[in-house]
Amino acid sequence: MLQCVSPSDFDIVRKYGCAVIDCSWARLDNTPFNRMKTSHPRILPFLVTANPINYGKPYQLSCVEAIAATLIITGFPNEAELHLGKFSWGHSFLELNSELLEKYNLCTSSEEIITAQETYLKKAWQEKLDRLRKLVVANAKAGKCSYIRVIHEHFLDPPGKRILADQSEILSHPPYSPDVAPSNYHLFRSMAHGLADQHFRSYEEVKNWVDSWIVSKDDQFFRRGIRTLSERWEKVVASDGQYFES
């Protein structure tokens, strides 16, 4: 069983350094992990990404984020900042994960890291439920119609369902809508790659960048997107409302 990176790995990182597997998150199933030999394999605990492609998503770190997290947890914060400093968004990774990284640094083993992770996630989820419950109850007492009326069961664990059972209607429904905008598949995906390492200071800069990006695409780019629409629609219908990887 793989262990989590922890401060107990300090000597290993000091002597051998650290490395990450550079692969696409969309192709994990095709990555031959079993053929990759290493004497000290490790996984990272819960952290949130700050890179422009997957900003705000849990676990899906870029290579530099993974290396930086490993260095910080094992006791090499200066080296971590050196790597992150090469990216305009690097400081955001430290800001988003400051509380978690501080907790992980106080651990002494992989088991303690896992415990710290689970405690943090449980507390964060409970705080979210408490805020939601207070809002619903306050609106009910004031005779107002709460804007939180229907909640997807996908987002609630059993305790959450019990807490909100009296105030809300739990909707059994797929977490992802089958009515997916075609632009999500073609235009926005390509645009996301173009936005990597971009930094905007005003609305005008954003607008000018988007305008110039669209102009830079030739007719074939848009024709290709239109031709694949029918394939996308067929896949959505065939999935019967279930989530699938495009």
Image (cartoon, rainbow, N blue to C red):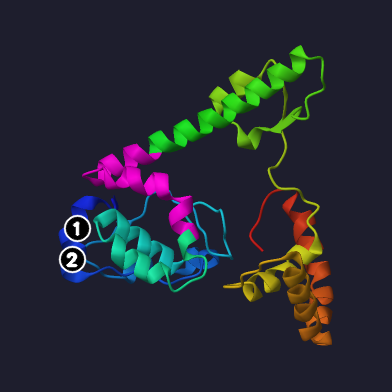
Write down the residue under mark 1.
10
- Of 50 and 231, which appears nearest the observer? 50
Residue 63 lies, with reference to residue 142, above or below; the image says: below
- Is residue 106 highlighted in magenta? yes
Residue 20 in sight: no
Image: magenta residue range: 92-117
Q: From the top left corner, tell me how far across and down residue 188 is, in percent.
A: 72, 68
Q: Amino acid at mark 2?
A: Arg
Q: From the top left corner, tell me how far across and down residue 113 is, in percent.
A: 30, 43
- Is residue 133 highlighted in magenta? no
Q: From the top left corner, tell me how far across and down residue 52 is, in percent.
A: 58, 65
What kind of secondary structure does the magenta stretch mostly adopt? helix
> Which of the 4 quarters of the picture holds residue 180?
bottom right
Q: Quadrant of the C terminus?
A: bottom right
Residue 132 in sight: yes
Task: Answer with left or right where residue 196 lies relative to residue 206.
Answer: left
Report the number of discs.
2
- Sort mark 2 into few (<14), some (14-19) or many (20+) by Cα contacts within 10 Å: few
> Which secondary structure lies at badge 1?
helix
Q: Give the number of the disc on residue 14.
A: 2
Q: Amino acid at mark 1?
A: Phe
Residue 106 lies, with reference to residue 144, above or below; the image says: below
> Which of the 4 quarters of the picture holds residue 205?
bottom right
Task: Answer with left or right where residue 164 lies relative to residue 220.
Answer: left
> Which secondary structure lies at badge 2?
helix
